[in-house]
Amino acid sequence: MNTGYNKSLAIVIDTIDYGESDRIITFYTPGDGKLKGVAKGARRSRRRFVNSLDPFSLGEIIFFYKEGRDLVRIDDSKPRYHFGGIKGDIGRLPYGSYMLEFVREMTRERQANGRIFNLLLRFLRMLEDGEQPDKVIVCFNMRLFAALGYLPSLGKCVLCSGIPDREMYSFSSRDGGIICGSCGEKRPGGCISISGGTVKFLMASSRMELDKIGRLVPSPSILEEGNRVLRDFLRYQLGKELRTVRFIDEIGGLTPP
């Protein structure tokens, strides 16, 4: 990021009212990663930032950066897309909000990762286009964990490198993947049972080309297991649970572990 004026495509992932008329905007860019900026007068202006700095907004943001300052100054924003199909659907809004919160909480400021930007954009489009929300979230989690370097190990026991029984596995968030029966005895508590079918689905969702994810047709039990495991894994990585998980629970989505 250059000192002075910058222009970038961005997805707004969070907004906070600041003072009487300003807003703090958190947005994710392909070239500079996650940034926070102040939009002066954003709460009062009806023309300058209209409909362009709300969560889910995809647009071109012009901002001023000065070295040593925590916040950039957002001077203009031109909207391109608003994901109205997510924002206007109570059945999909919690899942889209989960994606934004995941990126906000799991990424550091000013660390460029164009892959994360592209994944967030692609999965928001999948969600809006009608893909099954629980499936979208499993695949989103796996792809984002991979992009961030946190992908859980699913091919062999993370403790002894042995191949667990193909029907049932145990998953340990603390150890970062599946563990075999023998090693599981050394890890009393803290492990989650997971079927071979769920492991295969998780592995496929992390590897399959994005435009082919629609071909995956997991059973309800596999989706429930997959989401339960990844929810626990994310909680372990963050040291807390995302607020939007409770939002999803309220509409009957992800099942708590």
Image: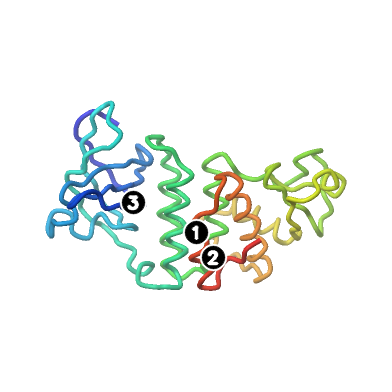
The residue at 52%/61% (across/down) is: 245
Q: What residue type is labelled 1?
A: Asp
Quarter containing the C terminus: bottom right
Secondary structure at numbered mark 2: helix
Secondary structure at numbered mark 3: strand
Q: Position of residue 152 (x, y in %)?
A: 65, 45
Q: Position of residue 125 (x, y in %)?
A: 41, 61
Residue assigned mark 2: 214
Residue assigned mark 3: 11
Of callouts 1 and 3, the N-terminal one? 3
Q: Given contact means CB atoms under 8 Å apart, are the residues at marks 1 and 2 in contact? A: yes
Q: Is residue 106 left or right of residue 10?
A: right
Q: Nearer the viewer, residue 216 or 163?
A: 163
Q: Which amino acid does label 2 sit on?
A: Gly
Tell me the colour scheme of the image.
rainbow
Q: Distance between the residues labelled 1 and 3?
A: 21 Å
Q: Position of residue 88 (x, y in %)?
A: 35, 72
Q: Quarter of the image holding residue 220?
A: bottom right
Q: Which amino acid does label 3 sit on?
A: Ile
The residue at 28%/57% (across/down) is: 54
Q: Distance between the residues labelled 3 and 2?
A: 24 Å
Q: Which of 104 and 148 is in front in this view?
A: 104
Residue assigned mark 1: 211
